Amino acid sequence: MSALQTLAAAETVHGSVGAIGYGLAAIGPGVGVGIIFGNGTQAMARQPEAAGLIRANQILGFVLCEALALIGLVMPFVYGQ
């Protein structure tokens, strides 16, 4: 195997590790969003009069979870260079 083929193989593996890393990083926010909306729906069913406050808290939790997912998306590109 020549040096050029070895370098090309190393670049392919390096890119694949970043993709696998992001895939694993997306599991956490995905579970978090599911928990937030599942528990929020239960809370609104139990106390319909507090639906506005619960919905506001759901949106805040969703935004924070998605921020983690976006950071996980960017990190392989930042450290991959």
Image (cartoon, helix red, strand yellow):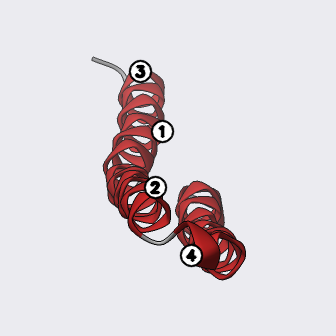
- Front residue of 41 and 71: 41
Q: Give the image location of residue 47, x and y in percent.
A: 47, 72
- Front residue of 29 and 23: 29
According to the image, label 2 marks what residue? Answer: 41
The amino acid at mark 3 is Gln
- Front residue of 64 and 9: 64
Mark 4 vs mark 1, CA separation in Å: 31 Å
At a point 72% along the width and 74% down the height, the residue shown is: 52
According to the image, label 1 marks what residue? Answer: 15
- Mark nearer the viewer, 3 or 4: 4
At a point 63% along the width and 70% down the height, the residue shown is: 51
The amino acid at mark 4 is Gly
- Tell whether 4 sits left or right of 63: left
Mark 4 vs mark 2, CA separation in Å: 14 Å
- Mark nearer the viewer, 2 or 3: 2
Residue 61: assigned label = 4
